[in-house]
Image (cartoon, helix red, strand yellow):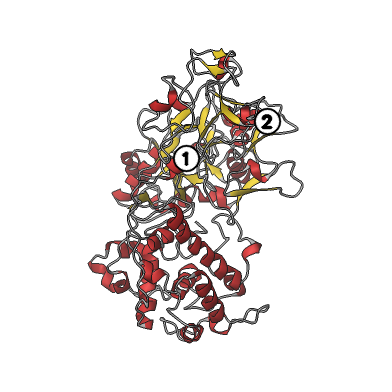
Amino acid sequence: MIARSLRRVAALALAASLASLGACAATTTEDEGMGTWEDALGFDKDSVLTDAEFTDATALTSGQIQAFLEHTHCGYRSSLADYVDPKSGFSAAQMLANASAKYAINPIEFLVRLQVERSMLCKAVDTYAIEHALSCGCPDGAPCSAAYAGFDRQVQCAASHFRKYLDDIDTSGHTTSGWAPHKTKNSSDPIAVTPANAATAALYTYTPWVYNGGNQLHYQVWNAITKSLSYKPSGTVPETKKPTTAYSPSAAAGAATVPRGCTDDAECNHGVQHTGSVCANSGPERGSCIDACHTDSDCPTGGTCDATVLPHSQCTNAPPATGTRCAADADCTGGSAGASRVCSTDSHTCIVGCHSDDDCGANGGGKKGICDRGLRTWQCVYRAELGDACTADKDCNGGVGGTARVCDDTKHLCIDGCRVDADCDSSSACEWPGGEAMGICLFDPTRENTAPLRAPSGCPALAFPSGVKIQTVRDAVLEAAYANHLEAGKTAPKCFIDVDNLVDPDTGAKLEYATVRLSDHFTLHELVGTEVAQGYGRRVLLEPSAVESLENFRRSEPGAFSPTSGYRSPLHQEATCKSLCGQPWCAGTCARYSRHMWGDAFDLPVTFYSYKYAQLACDAGFMFAYNEAHNHLHVDMNPRSASCVIQFD
């Protein structure tokens, strides 16, 4: 995925109403050239465009594109009609035509993207919009990359990615993020989608949403533009044939062979014992990972390392060799639990790897390995947790790259960080903010995301009322900030939602902070937005049961609203109190142990400052309803109370 559409939030209401196409849809008017309700009729989430439409590079000449820009489908003269690249001297129309010819993508696709992303066809736009016209290199939650600034670069970036998606499908049957013709995958809504062709799979790779300004809006704008052009596909491109073998992203991740080059055993078994895989230290295989052993601990549980076997010692209960044909994981384990060997569901051969933590053994200290699904080949690794003591990076990353974990040189604790790009997953690069002692892994749009999920380190996935699941992550620094806010016998939270890395652990799908819905009426952004927008932090807490109670309250009577405050980190809570009394907490007015810090409290608008709404909040499932400061209703899940308490200032 390149970037979520910046038009998505603005078009949300329109897209949502058109999703059902009920009787009231006929009253919907055209929204800045996004098309009318009639343009949305016939939308099929599984077949957004045909391959013939998507790859019709001769659909429009540069002259025809220019004529359209001068009088678009909404009757507006686009700013792009007058745009000329200061370096090449090419007009916007020429650059669109050139990219279409070079990458064999329909130029109308670019016109649609220009409208969906930044409404560039139907309203005046500034220089910034032109510089980032297609939002290529503009990941959510981060500034647009200067490397992609410029209209021509934007067009080339989008066109090249579309072509790569199609080429990947031709060669491997799927795109880099796992979208494939005739294979079901959840969108980020999440909705199950089974692309009927390569074009639809490519569109979901670029924008993995059905509604919320996603491919339904694309379909709508496409129809509006092609209707004004009286366009019909000029070529006949056969639809993608159904593949004969199944494909799944997780299977592909486990299909790679054992890396051949090594200098020590950890590069073959990642510090986990009982794999039956070591680094050869003699003979022609020296420096390669082989199926062998050096000590009994290298062998599956219960086995011994037989040094009499030549040229390399072998386990007496050696598991089937890597590369052996298999039908199930049991065919590769030799009957030993935690053997760190599985059957690749892609190649159907035994590999050193894992499908779950249960496949992993323990290290010499008896600590069990975990299955790191963020690595290109899913592997069992042993490593310390974030915040644990360390002496070297290897203690924190298990001896493998891509984990985004290193040992802090000063505090000698494992932290989220990096020294080089190899420390980050394949979709990120290591960047060093000015003056910082350690780098951080940041999403890089030039890299393909083949590693969407880091191992959770024991952190749970949170399931919200909408059906969305979000994997939480460890944050030792934020955990420590709770030290002055813990009641007797309480421990600080360890795992938090990272708004910059929202991942569904079941699918590996990346979710979008600005629009992901946690219930029918509330987005994540609405419930934690004050914490993020005011710069206190980008890792948050949110209790699913509190979201469910808030949704119940919304349905009971009040109508549309957004909380005025949700999650507050300890730093945020202290700043709130200081604004009231000058202290980090205020007796009776600003709690030291506020439930806002635990993600199960919300402040609701002054409209709800009454006993009536307090009672409705209790009926909805909240355990405390506090008419506070005469300007809002505070509600939370108060774990100290067996029944709901209503209180007034």
The answer to whether residue 355 is left or right of residue 520 is right
Residue 255 - label = 1
Q: List x then y, in percent, for residue 304.
A: 53, 12
Residue 263 - label = 2
Q: List x then y, in percent, for residue 488.
A: 54, 22
The answer to whether residue 644 is left or right of residue 104 is left
Labelled pair 2, 1 in contact (Cβ < 8 Å): no
Q: Residue at x 60, y 21 (%)?
A: 311
Question: Quarter of the image holding residue 615?
Answer: top left
Looking at the image, is mark 2 or mark 1 earlier in the sequence? 1
- In the picture shown, does residue 88 fall above or below 203? below
The answer to whether residue 349 is left or right of residue 557 is right
Residue 609 or residue 203, whichever sits in front:
203
Q: List x then y, in percent, for residue 573.
A: 58, 41
In the structure shown, which secondary structural element does the residue marked by tag 2 occupy?
loop
Few, some or many C-alpha atoms within 10 Å of disc 1 (few <14, some 14-19, many ≥20)? many
The three-letter code of the residue at mark 2 reads Thr
